[in-house]
């Protein structure tokens, strides 16, 4: 079989490609560059980071005329075997928030197996919009993109612009049905059977009256969004690059992880591309770490503007948690992809004066047991994992079994809308961007929104 594949490959002279992904950037790179490319053949995707992606197919309705049977999605653990079995010529890394050293470990594995190792850049993966685009990206997962995006959207709306947000993909369901998704109400979230992670990103926009798009086919998404927007705000995921050319590229850095702006892919590339770097959370970070981030940014992008910001935390009903033993539930991706050991919930617990934060590990149920084994820094926080109904049920059971007086919810959404049978009081934490130079951010945002894009064609 392998000999036959090699013979056919030599005959048609196509480059045979494996795309390493995590149900997001990988599909976008395929759609943007490979779908209609007669000189290359994507022989499979691989899956990492997100559960229950491997074993599926990228459907034929999305993969185009050259892929009448769709494209298989395989476990990344089988990469070396797949390179041989598929006679792959090249392997493309297409997911985010990886240490530079891990990127090169993957590259070494690919090279040793005989294939080329590639990364795809903006020229081959970014679409051009007819409307101004402001992108909000980051150095790492959990730096504060969401609160920054909300601030940017508010500045635009207060100035009379019609804003549409386009969110980095999270297509965990039926890919064909999720090609273009439009969310304008909570009913839309229910209809699309959104996961907790999806709700965390979409609900804040809906609360502000902003339509948000997401899905799989980001050129189609862009063209539909352009019909109802004066300005498009790209709401990035993890520390990935935007899918669209930006008139203003804002990048958030986190002094709680000082130095990471030089150590992670593609976060460093984001910093090097940035028009504005916002060093967030300066109110809860060490001053020396804030200065270190600033020096590192200046070193690799001396032309960028730099602004500091506070992540201002408020708590609903603090009297329910003051002096109590609490379970802290934090944003899942911040703790897992972002490798943080705490988030806004822990800071809120310190601020209000709780009696203590409990260790949730003894009470973990189902897949959450594996999450704690993998991410060993998680000792007194529970990540809000919820990629499907089963995992949401496991999260609820873990909370109910925990020996605590109350629950602090440090996620971007009100988890009570999803977890309806929790047997303890739940107190929600809010966090907003409080920039130290509001005039700078406003002037840059409004300038980009009104900019005429000379020489750019959609």
Image: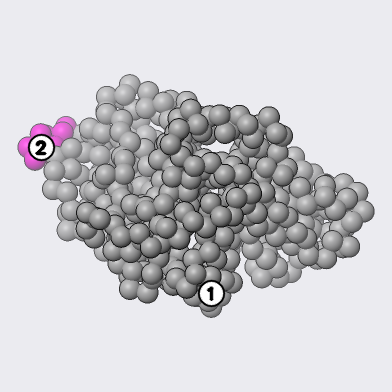
251 lies above or below 216: above
Q: Along the line of sight, which residue is nearer the eye, 365 or 312?
A: 312
The residue positioned 25% from the left and 39% from the top of the image is 17
Q: Is residue 7 magenta?
A: yes
In this rendered view, identify the residue nearer to me: 439 or 449: 439
Q: Residue 13: which numbered mark, if any?
A: 2
Magenta segment main secondary structure: helix
The answer to whether 310 appears left or right of 268 in the picture is right
Residue at 31% x, 40% y is 121
What is the C-alpha distance between the residues marked 1 and 2? Answer: 51 Å
Residue 107, how many percent across, how many down? 37, 27
Residue 233 placement: quadrant: bottom left
Locate the C terminus and report the quarter of the image it occupies. bottom left
Judge the density around disc 2: few (<14), some (14-19), many (≥20) Cα neighbours within 10 Å.
few
Q: Which residues are magenta?
A: 3-13
Q: Residue at x 57, y 33 (%)?
A: 294
* Relative image position of residue 444 (x, y in whole percent): 47, 54
Quadrant for the N terminus in the image? top left
User: x, y percentage for residue 377?
Assistant: 68, 36
Which dot, 1 or 2, sits closer to the camera? 1
Would residue 208 appear left or right of 36 to someone viewing this image? right
The answer to which image quadrant residue 169 occupies is: bottom left
Whether residue 137 sits left or right of residue 437 in the image: it is left
């Amino acid at each position: 079989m392998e000999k036959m594949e090699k013979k056919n490959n030599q005959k048609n002279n196509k480059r045979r490609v494996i795309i390493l992904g995590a149900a997001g950037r990988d599909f976008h790179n395929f759609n943007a560059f490979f779908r209609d490319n007669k000189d290359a053949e994507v022989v499979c995707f691989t899956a990492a980071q997100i559960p229950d992606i491997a074993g599926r197919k990228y459907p034929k309705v999305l993969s185009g005329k050259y892929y009448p049977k769709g494209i298989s999605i395989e476990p990344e653990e089988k990469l070396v075997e797949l390179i041989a079995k598929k006679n792959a010529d090249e392997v493309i890394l297409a997911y985010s928030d990886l240490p530079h050293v891990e990127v090169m470990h993957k590259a070494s594995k690919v090279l040793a197996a005989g294939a080329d190792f590639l990364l795809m850049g903006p020229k081959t993966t970014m679409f051009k919009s007819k409307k101004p685009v402001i992108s909000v990206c980051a150095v790492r997962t959990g730096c504060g993109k969401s609160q920054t995006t909300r601030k940017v959207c508010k500045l635009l709306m207060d100035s009379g612009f019609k804003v549409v947000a386009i969110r980095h993909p999270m297509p965990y369901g039926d890919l064909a049905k999720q090609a273009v998704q439009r969310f304008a109400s909570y009913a839309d979230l229910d209809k699309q059977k959104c996961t907790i992670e999806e709700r965390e990103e979409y609900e804040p926009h809906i609360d502000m009256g902003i339509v948000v798009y997401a899905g799989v086919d980001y050129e189609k998404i862009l063209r539909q969004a352009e019909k109802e927007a004066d300005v498009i705000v790209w709401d990035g995921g993890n520390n990935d690059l935007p899918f669209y050319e930006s008139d203003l590229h804002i990048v958030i850095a986190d002094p709680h992880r000082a130095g990471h702006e030089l150590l992670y892919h593609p976060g460093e590339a984001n910093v090097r591309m940035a028009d504005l770097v916002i060093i967030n959370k300066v109110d809860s970070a060490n001053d020396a770490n804030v200065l270190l981030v600033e020096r590192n940014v200046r070193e690799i992008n001396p032309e960028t503007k730099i602004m500091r910001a506070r992540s201002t935390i408020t708590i609903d009903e603090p009297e329910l948690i003051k002096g109590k033993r609490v379970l802290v539930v934090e944003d899942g991706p911040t703790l897992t992809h972002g490798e943080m050991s705490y988030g806004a919930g822990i800071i809120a617990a310190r601020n209000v004066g709780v009696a203590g934060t409990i260790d949730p590990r003894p009470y973990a149920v189902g897949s959450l047991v594996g999450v704690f084994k993998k991410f060993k820094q998680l000792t007194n926080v529970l990540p809000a994992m919820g990629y499907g109904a089963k995992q949401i049920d496991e999260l609820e059971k873990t909370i109910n079994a925990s020996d605590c007086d109350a629950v602090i919810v440090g996620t971007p959404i009100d988890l009570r809308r999803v977890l309806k049978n929790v047997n303890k009081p739940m107190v929600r934490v809010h966090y907003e961007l409080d920039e130290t130079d509001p005039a700078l951010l406003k002037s840059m945002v409004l300038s980009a929104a009104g900019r005429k894009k000379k020489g750019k064609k959609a």
